[in-house]
Image (cartoon, grey):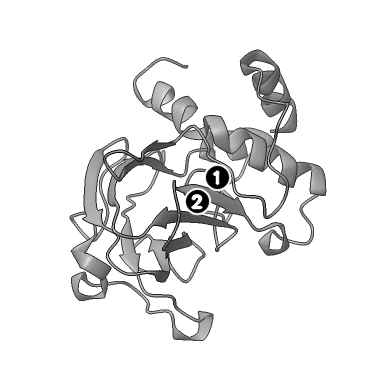
Amino acid sequence: MARFAHLALLAFGLLPGIALAGEPFVPSWIKNDPAAKTVAIEIVADWNQVERYRRDNIRTDIIDFNGYWDGNLTIIVPEEWSVQIEFINGSSNFRHGLMVTRVYARSDMPVKLEAEDAIWGAYTAPLEGIKINEKRQLNFVAQQAGNYFLACPRQTHLMDGHWIGFEVRGNLVRAVAIVHEDKFPQEQPQDAHRVARATSAMASSWRSLQIRGGLS
């Protein structure tokens, strides 16, 4: 993973200016239109699953959105902006979905999410997840400032960590993302954290190319 990421970063010129832990940044998969008060976000489920198989020759217990999981990334959008999410199931094996939900304590997480759990009615259908390489559009208005989840509604997926943070904030001029270093596993090297932050800028573009047949 680190070798692939380093070569890719050199190729795309992304090494300079990598965001520090907790520093807001705008990855390539977030496109802001302040004049229209709109943000377009591309989210890929299991975007680096193939790389995990190659590295470890096993399927790890990590299921992710754009390479992040279990709340170690938060996407922050301005209040009252229109949010347009293109959701892609990049998994090689499993159905996945996407839903905006309230914040759950780990002890309070349901086994699976239902349509009524969706904030602003924002969820992909069917709730059991879309098929491998399928896409869905999710459109909603970020109506109220506060903290939320972007979560997979499939059975046990939320409990297994398939969620990232989603915050709506007033007086914000553009949507950003923040990486939470303290929420990565302790056994994961710090260098891997930096690689994850850096490669997130290309995660969706890389995965989309693979889905479209641009990469073997």
Q: Residue at x 54, y 29 (%)?
A: 202
- Dots 1 and 2: beta carbons under 8 Å? yes
Question: Can you give x and y, in whole percent of width and height, for residue 8 in the image?
Answer: 64, 20
Residue 165 vertical placement versus 87 (above, below): below
Q: Image height check: is 106 above or below 92?
A: below
Could you tell whether 102 is left or right of 180 in the image? left
Inspect the image, locate mark 1, and give the three-letter code of the amino acid beneath it: Gly
The circle on residue 67 is 1
Can the viewer see residue 165 in this picture? yes
Name of the residue lying farthest toward the bottom: 107
Residue 61 locus on image (x, y percent): 57, 57
Q: Residue at 62% across / 34% down in the picture?
A: 199
For the image shown, how many numbered marks are present on the structure? 2
Q: Is residue 154 visible?
A: no
- Location of mark 2 (residue): 64
Tell me which corner region of the image, top left, top right, bottom left or bottom right, holds residue 200.
top right
User: Would you call the spot at circle 1 few (<14 residues within 10 Å), some (14-19), or many (20 or more)?
Assistant: many
**Cα gap from disc 1 to disc 2, whole angstroms:** 5 Å
**Residue at position x 68%, y 25% in the image:** 4
201 to the left or right of 196: left
Q: Residues within 10 Å of mark 2 (few under 14, many from 20)?
A: many
Image spot of residue 212 (x, y percent): 34, 21
**In the picture, which quadrant includes the N terminus?**
top right
> For the residue marked with disc 2, what is the amino acid?
Asp
Element marked by disc 2: loop
Q: Can you give x and y, in whole percent of width and height, for residue 72 in the image?
A: 60, 58
Q: Is residue 57 above or below residue 142?
A: above
- Helix, strand or loop at disc 1? loop
